[in-house]
Amino acid sequence: MPITILIGAQWGDEGKGRVVDWLASSADIVARYAGGDNAGHTVALDSSVYKLHLVPSGILHSDVVSIMGNGMVINPVNLVREIESLRKLGLEITPERLVISSRAHIITPAHVALDKANETVLGDSKIGTTLRGIGPAYLDKTGRAGIRTGDMLLDVEEFAERLIATIESANARLALQGMETLDPQSAAESYLEAAAVLKPFIKDTSIYLYAALTAGKHIVCEGAQGTLLDIDHGSYPFVTSSSPTAGGALTGLGVGPLFVDRVLGVAKAFSTRVGGGPMPTELEGEIARRLRGSGDNFWDEYGTTTGRPRRCGWLDVVMLRYAVSVNGFSEMMLTKLDILSGLDELKLAVAYEIDGQRHEYPPVNNETLDRATPIYETLPGWHEDISNCRAFSQLPAAALNYIERVASLCAVPINSVSVGPERDQLVLR
Ligand code: GDP
Ligand code: IMO
Ligand code: MG
């Protein structure tokens, strides 16, 4: 199995981190291919809870190499901070275990300031970004004005010069929006320190991965965000600025499609979304509160990166079906099935009704999507505690029925579900 691509099938936070942690136990390399520290991937292990934003979730396995691919946008100061905090938790992080692409783009303090300024200008129509500078950094990348991790390998003066030039150019944009500008020298200082720390970790990861693949190594590509946040395929403009879908894994790592033999879509057993944008099955009231949780548990639906309460609703099969078509999943996995225990009945949105017509796929325009009424199918719930189930045969009939109905509506097999956040709380077929 040369390459497994793991993809969020919804709006992010599907539990990708914990699934990568599972797949990493039989992998040589875990490689992240998109996004930046807008991501928050939680892995619970032996009474510790790791919240990873930039470092791939493979880092928890001492025999796995973690790669940060060229498709990522990296804030070097935040990355150094994350490495230090993981070291404090006892993880060994060396240039042999963590390799950063020399072609990833750098998020500067100016990008962070611009992200905030853009959201302020949008007011009520804001995207609800994570304010990590993601959009402005990708804008500079595609506008051919960005700076890259490889620039940190230049001598200090040259890197400083590039960094200051990008901050000055952002200052002009900030001033135009009537926002406070940054002092380029002091903004650059912490970046120069971070660059010195990160230098030994930076390599051409595409060449590294090709050598590994031709030597028969197994790579898990760790998706961040989710299909419905994809810049091309999501509910634009309420999306992130990268390509978290299957194609993004190839361009975001510089690997060829013929090495891929498995595309695993990870979906939560219900829907959540954080930030603005359409969400046809969003609920308010008692069921939403049940799905979200009180906030007392680390797995409750509050953003790993921003702490914002996540919007919750029934599983939206229309969106899942769309994710299947965009990514071509070879299989899907359902996470957080345990959260549905105790509900008398469960609903699946199997289609939308828009202006009297039935739709099996989401329409392209958000204005049309806003008029969509989900057509629900009601299934029986179950009351048993399933958190100790480890085989499909141990699951209550109603839970099996729920899983099989989702698989059949999406025409993709579901061979694994998770029933709790811990590493071993998996049910495999
Ligand atoms: P990611 O961004 O896709 O990695 O997901 P997040 O880490 O942001 O959010 C998923 C949350 O659900 C985390 O707190 C996980 O610990 C938790 N989680 C994952 N799988 C399960 C599960 O099967 N049951 C429960 N109760 N929690 C889970
Ligand atoms: P993981 O990897 C959930 C959302 C933001 C916002 C939109 C754009 O943990 O699943 P951005 O800061 O990227 O410009 O914000 O995308 N978003 C996420 N939502 N999980 C994520 O990552 C997300 N990354 C970005 O909330 O709506
Ligand atoms: Mg997350």
Image: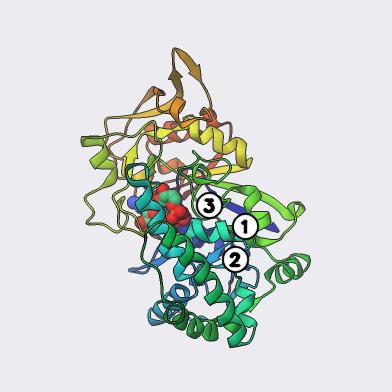
What is the x, y in percent for residue 94? 55, 83
Report whether the residue tagged 2 is closer than 8 Å to ligand 2: no
What is the x, y in percent for residue 427? 46, 49
Q: Nearer the viewer, mark 3 or mark 1?
A: 1
Real-space Cα separation, disc 1 to disc 2, in angstroms: 8 Å
Q: Is residue 379 above or below residue 194?
A: above
Label 1: element kind: loop
> Which residue is depicted at the point 25% across and 48% down?
293
Observer-nearest of 27 and 276: 276
- The amino acid beneath tag 1 is Gly
Observer-nearest of 11 and 184: 184
User: In the rendered image, which residue does mark 1 sit on?
Assistant: 143
Report whether the residue tagged 3 is closer than 8 Å to ligand 2: yes
Observer-nearest of 159 and 195: 159
Q: Is residue 336 above or below residue 19?
A: above
- The amino acid beneath tag 3 is Ser
- In the rendered structure, the answer to whether residue 103 lies left or right of residue 111 reads right
Residue 241, numbered circle: 3
